Image (cartoon, rainbow, N blue to C red):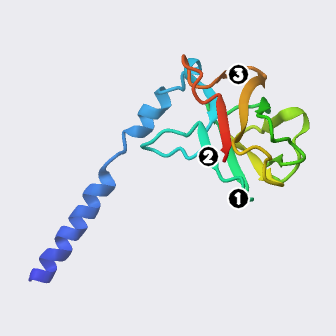
Amino acid sequence: MRLLRSYYYVLLSLWLFAACQDPRGDQRDDNLFDPANAFIRFNYEDDLIGTALDTLSISGDNLDEVIIPIALSSPPQEVPIAVTYEQITSEGIMEGVHFEIRDETDNLIDNNTLVLTPGDFDVSLVYRPLAAPTASLSYVTFRLITLQPEVVGIGFPGSQRGSTFTLRIE
């Protein structure tokens, strides 16, 4: 009898759960993304409870690559977005001598421009060290400067935070 009662409760529970409707589907349909809050930013080590870093310190002896993600926060785009950045280096470090910058498919980047294809929400710069810098403290700063087409803002709305990322090589 106990076994029969257990089966009854299990079947009743399954039937009740199956009858429930998830209201979030309807809520999502009416909740359109606000284009005024769309942005693109550097997204190094972002997680759900923390914030992305805007500076990373690495050892000059370390020859490991550093992958620097750039994230788009917007509705899906229908056209490719060209993201242009500038790179500022300190004395004692030169691109082509001490490091190179590649895209996530290991190609050298033309004209400091990366392309987000429709449906993609992130793209990465890859910093590849070639030799130790000559100065004891060097840096490479990347700054997002333009988007084509201009569909979103650069950095967080209102603050521009996230529009630059600095690698400190010590």
In whole angstroms, how far apart are the C-alphas of marks 2 and 1? 11 Å
In whole angstroms, how far apart are the C-alphas of marks 3 and 1? 38 Å
Vertical placement of residue 87 versus 11, above or below: above
Residue type pointed to by label 2: Ser
Quick one: label 3 or label 1, which is nearer the N terminus? Answer: 1
**Residue in view at x 16 percent, y 75 percent:** 6
Whether residues under marks 2 and 1 lie with C-beta atoms below 8 angstroms apart, the answer is no
**Residue in view at x 56 percent, y 47 percent:** 45
Q: Where is residue 149 drawn, in percent x and y?
A: 78, 22
Numbered label attached to residue 128: none
Residue at numbered disc 3: 151
- At label 1, counting other C-alpha atoms closer than 10 Å, the crowd grade (few under 14, some 14-19, many 20 or more) is few
Residue at numbered disc 2: 57
- At label 3, counting other C-alpha atoms closer than 10 Å, the crowd grade (few under 14, some 14-19, many 20 or more) is some
Vertical placement of residue 166 versus 33, above or below: below
**Residue in view at x 49 percent, y 38 percent:** 51
Quarter of the picture containing the N terminus is bottom left
